[in-house]
Image (cartoon, grey):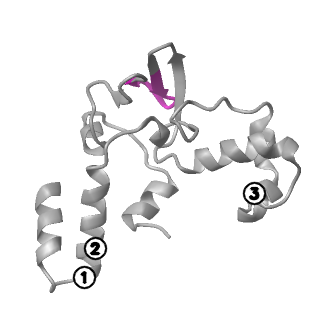
Amino acid sequence: MTDFVIEYYSHEGYADLQTLKLMNNYATFLKKPLTLGMFVPVDETGSILKEPKNYTSWKSLKHNTKRSAGDVGSTAFEEYKVYQKAEKKCLFEGFKIAYNGFSVVRIIAMYDESIELSFNKNEKLFQNFNDIESLTYFNEIYLNGAALRKIGIHK
């Protein structure tokens, strides 16, 4: 399905362009290779970021959720801002680290612990899953607002 939509979109200039664009966005999204940063906050090198102390409380303050929150404040809160920025890059909701070993990271969905993914740190690849489309193996995986915006469903 995804190959057909991508191919069709690249050759057809007519029909409902909005629908075609949405189909192309979705198909392209499904073909994206999986990265750990799609599930949990990571730094620029792909290493897992530790959640700052009292981060949930800090994030709940209205002035810290605004887009301008990154522009104002002291360097004491830099750790919070870095984590928040990385968190906004995640595409899937509700995942947490179950195990963070030397060469393998195991993440689980907080809403269904039977949804478990293992990530090889050395190869930077998930075991048994290559792209977003491969996650259809699971019954329920939730996209967040950032993912829906990439597809074009929400702005």
Residue that badge 2 annotates: 21
Q: Amino acid at mark 2?
A: Lys
Quarter location, residue 71:
bottom right
Name the mark nearer the viewer: 2 or 3.
Answer: 3
Residue displayed at 54% across by 31% down: 47
**Disc 3 and disc 1: Cα gap in Å?**
37 Å
**Quarter occupied by the N terminus:** bottom left
Q: State whether the magenta stretch is mostly helix, strand or loop.
A: strand
- Write the start and end of the magenta stretch as one range: 106-119
Label 1 and label 2: CA atoms lie apart by: 6 Å
Q: Which residue is mark 1?
A: 17
> Which residue sits furthest bottom?
14
Amino acid type of disc 3?
Answer: Gly
Determine whether, in the image, residue 67 is placed left or right of residue 97. Answer: right
Quick check: 19 left or right of 14? Answer: right
Residue bearing mark 3: 70
